Amino acid sequence: MDKIYFLIKNKYPLSLYEEDFILSNKGKIIFVNNYDYSDNKELKKYIKKVFNIYPTIIPIDEFLRLNNVNLFYNDIVFYIENIKNYNLKNFNIIKKDVYKHNWNNFITNEKLIINSSIISKHIYKKIKKKYLYSNRFNHALNVGFISYKIGFFQKEINDNNSLFLAGLIHDIAKDIDINKQKKLALNNKFYIDSKDYVLHQFAGAEIYKKLLRDNNPDIYTSISFHCTGKKDMNLFEKIIFLSDKYDPLRYINDKNKHSNKIKILQDSYLDFSHSFEYLTLDQVSYFKSKKYDINENYYSKEFYNYYLKK
Ligand SMILES: [Fe+2]
Ligand SMILES: [Fe+2]
């Protein structure tokens, strides 16, 4: 019987709560506990609750002594989830040396994104080469994955792929010349005269429609309001909004903030509405710290009045 190892990585941005697992009838699943996560009892309880299996957990030192094991790490789990019947033959089982892999890197193997049929190779390359570069692209990928993961835990969401896509594309207009952004933004049916830094949300939704020749209303509106928010957002829009604000890459240089934001992100898998509530408050202090006037943008004001003045 094949053994499949999942690494529980507590230092990793999304940590424990982002772990999800395949239920395989062809292999034995073993969870490997990372260095700093000592409470196996809680871990077991969590895995049982969410995935309805009793896990076997081994400490990482034991894992490192094993040779030639097949390790699934959570970077690729989103890919696995999509495969019906848990047929292991469909997976690339990745043999990894745990020391060589950079566990702090949240960016996933590109091949897996493309193979997962969420996005065509052609469009993916275009996004990467023409619209978003290096760190912006990494941020985009993170927002895609985070949204996907949050969606996975929400009963009401049944289209995680669209969440991934919206996350990947949300900032697609950000590196475009500002006049061009404005021109594109004017086509957006939600456009209201806004400050320059907000234009890319309206312009981005328009690029999405053209580039993907697609018009999913959730993707369109979630991109259109990812920066400002608005009143009465639906769950899809909220997920993109939160994933963007809490992408760990944003806080990578601020240790205190980093762990705080990651905690909120982790919590959002199991209690999204609570994390979203926290985010609304967080937004107000963010505006204050940046000296942004909430009245500067129509939709920011709308968001503020709707979620904070109730
Ligand atoms: Fe943005
Ligand atoms: Fe963003």
Image (cartoon, rainbow, N blue to C red):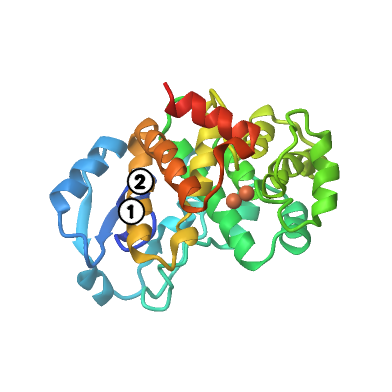
Quarter residue 212 falls in: top right
Measuring from the top left, give residue 64's x and y in whole percent. Answer: 27, 74
Disc 2 secondary structure class: helix
Q: Which residue is mark 2?
A: 264
Mark 2 Cα shell of 10 Å, populated few (<14), some (14-19), many (≥20): many
Image position of 70 with respect to 74: above or below: below
Image position of 98 with respect to 266: above or below: below
140 relative to 62 in the view: left or right: right
Frontmost residue, 291 versus 112: 291
What residue is rendered at 68% in x and 28% in y?
217
Quarter residue 182 falls in: top right
Frontmost residue, 288 versus 12: 288
Q: Which amino acid is tagged 1?
A: Asn
What residue is rendered at 56% in x and 63% in y?
109
What residue is rendered at 50% in x and 37% in y?
239
**Residue contact between numbered discs 2 and 1, judged by CB atoms under 8 Å:** yes
Measuring from the top left, give residue 30's x and y in whole percent. Answer: 27, 56
Disc 1 secondary structure class: helix
Measuring from the top left, give residue 218's x and y in whole percent. Answer: 63, 30
**Mark seen at residue 260:** 1
Q: Quadrant of the C terminus?
A: top left
Q: Is mark 2 within 8 Å of ligand 2?
A: no
9 relative to 164 in the view: left or right: left
